[in-house]
Amino acid sequence: MNNHLPTVLITHHIGSATRRTRRRMAKLACENILAGLRGERLPHCVNEEIYHR
């Protein structure tokens, strides 16, 4: 196995590390929390199948 790849750079995932993205993530979380407290559907639900049970 060749472990020498001079044109490859492997880094950790930092796609959410910008201020803009972190603010957006916080806003989405707050919107979900407030909707949940009001007994409403979560506006940013990742697993919407929970509503079809």
Image (spheres, grey):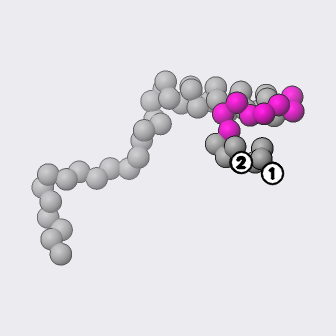
Q: Which residues are magenta?
A: 37-45
Q: Is residue 52 left or right of residue 9?
A: right
- Report if the CB atoms under discs 2 and 1 are less than 8 Å apart: yes
Could you tell me the amino acid type at mark 1? Arg
Local crowd size for mark 2, using a 10 Å CA cut-off: few (<14), some (14–19), many (≥20)? few
**In the image, what residue occupies the spot 50% across and 29% down?**
21
| Residue tagged 1 | 53
Please tell me which residue lies in front, 50 or 23.
Answer: 50
Q: Quadrant of residue 46?
A: top right
Q: Is residue 35 left or right of residue 5?
A: right
**In the image, what residue occupies the spot 15% across and 60% down?**
5
Could you tell me the amino acid type at mark 2? Glu
Local crowd size for mark 1, using a 10 Å CA cut-off: few (<14), some (14–19), many (≥20)? few
Which dot marks residue 49? 2
Q: Is residue 17 magenta?
A: no
Q: CA distance from mark 2 to mark 1?
A: 7 Å
Q: Quadrant of residue 31?
A: top right
Which dot marks residue 32? none
Q: Is residue 38 left or right of residue 22?
A: right
Q: Is residue 40 left or right of residue 28?
A: right
Looking at the rendered structure, the secondary structure element under dot 1 is: loop
- Residue 15, compared with residue 26, is above or below; it is below
Please provide percent x and percent y for residue 27: 64, 26
**In the image, what residue occupies the spot 23% across and 51% down?**
9
